[in-house]
Image: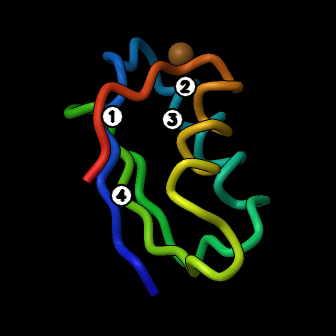
Amino acid sequence: MTKTTLQLETLTCPTCVKKIEGLLKKTPGVNSYEVLFNTSRVKAEFDENVVSLDDLRGRIQQLGYEVLSAK
Ligand SMILES: [Cu+2]
């Protein structure tokens, strides 16, 4: 299991959090996740054999949120 923290562009309302949570929930390989509204960060634990960090970034960006950095 791999852990990552993604820094997103500033989330402007709680609906953004719900949308991102919904996306992560249905993404195969994502074991657990937390979307932090105050810091606009996503913490996730995922299985690299199923989904890559690039894939996660891409999915969030496709949803309409810029991913500024990932570590
Ligand atoms: Cu919003």
Q: Position of residue 12 (x, y in %)?
A: 40, 12
The amino acid on which the numbered mark 1 sits, given as a three-letter code, is Phe
Q: Dot 4 surroundings within 10 Å: few (below 14), some, or many (20 or more)?
A: some
In the picture shown, does residue 17 fall above or below 52?
A: above
Residues at marks 3 and 1, CA–CA distance in whole angstroms:
7 Å
Residue ID for mark 3: 17
Q: Dot 2 surroundings within 10 Å: few (below 14), some, or many (20 or more)?
A: some
Q: Are marks 2 and 1 in contact (CB under 8 Å)?
A: yes
Q: Dot 3 surroundings within 10 Å: few (below 14), some, or many (20 or more)?
A: some
Residue ID for mark 4: 43
> Depth check: 16 or 9 in front?
9
Q: Nearer the viewer, mark 1 or mark 4?
A: 4
Q: Position of residue 9 (x, y in %)?
A: 35, 18
Q: Are marks 3 and 1 in contact (CB under 8 Å)?
A: yes
Residue 16's tag is 2
Q: Position of residue 71 (x, y in %)?
A: 25, 53
Q: Position of residue 6 (x, y in %)?
A: 34, 44
Residue 37's tag is 1
Q: Is residue 14 left or right of 56 when viewed as pictured?
A: left
Residues at marks 2 and 1, CA–CA distance in whole angstroms:
9 Å
Q: Does label 3 point to a residue whose CB lies under 8 Å from ligand 1?
A: yes
User: Residue at (58%, 62%) from the top-left corner?
Assistant: 52
